[in-house]
Image: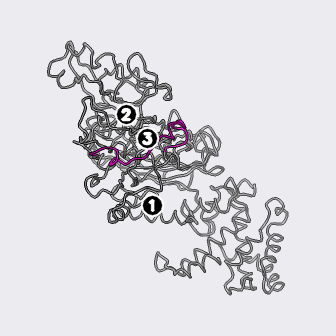
Amino acid sequence: MPTPGVCLNIMKERQEGDGVGTLKCPEMFLNQDYKLLHQYYLVRGWRYIDEMFPPDNSSIGDNLLSPELMAKVEWIRPTKLVHNPHLVVDGVSIFDFAQGDVGNCWFLAALGALTFQVHIMKNVFPSGQSFQKDYAGIFHFRFWRFGKWIDVVIDDKLPTINGRLIFVHPKSPKTPQSPSAPVEFWPALLEKAYAKVCGSYEDMKSGNVSEALLDFTGGVHMTVNPTTSPQGLWDLIHRAGKAHSLMGCGTSGEAEFNKKLDNGLVEGHAYTVTGVTTVMSHDKQVQLIRLFNPWGKTEWNGDWSDNSPLWKTVSAEERSRYLKAAEDGEFWMPMEDFCSTFSALDICSLCPDFLNGSSKCHWTSTFHEGQWLSGTSAGGRLECDTFWTNPQFRVNIFKMSKPCEQHTQGPNILVSVLQKPDKRNRRLIRKLFIGFSIFKVPSEMKGSRGKFPISFFKTNPPVAFTKVMYDSREVMDYFTLEPGEYLIVPHTYHPNQSASFILGILSMMKTHTQESFSMYTSKMDTTDSNQHVPFTRQMSDQYKDMTAEQLQKVLNQRFVMGDAQRTGGFSLEACHSIIALMDHSLTGTLDPEELSQLLIKVGLYKDIFFSMDKNRDGILSLYELQNAVEGTGLRVSESLLKLMTLRYGDSSGRISMENFICLALRLGRMAKIFRKLADGQKMHLKEDEWLRLTMYS
């Protein structure tokens, strides 16, 4: 039986509190421990086979290869495939690999960019792995996935047909080599690890360069369209290059067909940006960008290509430094042609210094997990009346105590929203159209608590927002904002679409961010409970030991009455649970004193329910529930509030009066139990104690 989700959630929070998910302590993907597995197989002299990503057709996918080709696939270890396998030969290089029979040029373009940044490559490709020393057929790689670093274990069995790798493979040398020549396999193994994370090799088909760039770095990502924003683009690219950023770009068109154009470029294809420079031609400065095609061939044939006569117009020194006339997939092209032919440029860096060209200006970053829940906190875009129900994050941007002299222009804050997957397989993940809006908080509302109501958004237009909403994994933009208090609202295009997300905020100035909740202050006044005393005495006289069946009848007659037909009233199972919570004597019934305490609480919780049900529809939304829970005298975290909505709400997350009363009773009793049994901030239970507590409460 799988571990309950709540337990997994608590374990995850504890791990994150201990630093698990950081680069120094990555989370074990699928709970596979590389060190333990490697040692186990090494000691026994066995070769590892990964049961979680087995060497069979399921790891390739159903629709990537034809049935005829699939029948020919053999999974072979490099040690059986070649005479002298190596992970790396003479360092990693963009010329080590060529694309195979899966349309993952987006991944390989990012991989090519990674080879230029050795310090980042070491994060993805941990050292100490080899075919020559302590080999056990097991390897591991690290990726940043949705807010945390994960360590991915694989075996080294690779899919082949007729002894040749199907997918990414080492480039074949133009001159024959001896059978004993070393052959490197790091690209094929890294691709396999990423395929495992995506779900299969088929799940790597088609994508955006930005996705892999982010997974390799966990850094700051931005996308620009060269065709619509060429002004200042050269300076941005040049600064990004100097800041050791990873860059990739893509052409428009159908990726499925990859039609080759007359100029040598390929439609719907991803390329790596490998360099930027300027040369002097005819006494004029020419801006050039160097690109790489992951195919390892098929290059640009226009101005400044390998065979362009324009190279004769530059000095011999520049020609020797930059020109390498070889059919290797790498080529130069002028900035003007780059802007007119490429539809997207992705830049990813460990730090956003490239935005203003200063390494002395310190950027700070904060990340917050959030969730859109249908019917409660998924309000849709700004034009929707329910927009205000979206998650709201307040940001205080403080003035820099020591202004950075080099930062004379450019943005000072970058905001991103990254939607988290709802399925394991990448190709099945539903991507919503997402965006965010930023509002300036008026001076009269600074310091106020709680969510901003619908009236605020009717009269205060956003000062910044995502102008175009995309159905992509991440949306981001950067702005220049004055010091002050702001409200950031991540949202989907359509309302009532549930999804989880990560909000990232990077700023040149000190910031403080917190999520806004509805606030309600109400102390349970015991004097108000006097109105329930006559009724409780009457019940005490009538029922000496009240059973669940009797309690169901009393609660529905007294507190639900005519609404029972609409809501269903208190169920028998709910009444069994209520008795277990209030049964001090452990008899399975309620004695007069226990019954009296229960009915007083039920009356109070009913009053709180209707005081919070502002529109009088007999249900509580998540917004109203937060107020109602606080009205009982308790405060809960956002994650617990969402769990209570899932447990006690209907399919839309709305909670009836009966369910709220059950929720409030359980919450109050469990909080009291913790305080009784806790030793400071923690509670330690033996297994039998834990089982008794959970099975009868």
Sequence-wise, the earlier of marks 2 and 1 is: 1
Residue at 60%, 48% (x, y): give it: 498
Identify the residue under disc 3.
Answer: 211
**Residue 347 visible, this angle:** yes
Badge nearest the viewer, 3 or 1: 1
Question: Regarding mark 3 in the picture, which secondary structure is present there?
Answer: helix
Per the image, is 63 magenta? yes
Question: Regarding mark 1 in the picture, which secondary structure is present there?
Answer: helix
| Range drawn in magenta | 60-84
Per the image, is 459 magenta? no
Q: Position of residue 617 (x, y in %)?
A: 75, 54
Marks 2 and 1 sit apart, C-alpha to C-alpha, by 32 Å
Q: Is residue 91 left or right of residue 693?
A: left
Q: Looking at numbered disc 3 in the image, what kind of residue is underneath it?
A: Glu
Colour mapping: one colour
Q: Nearer the viewer, residue 295 or 461?
A: 295
Q: Looking at numbered disc 2 in the image, what kind of residue is underneath it?
A: Gly
Identify the residue under disc 2.
Answer: 248
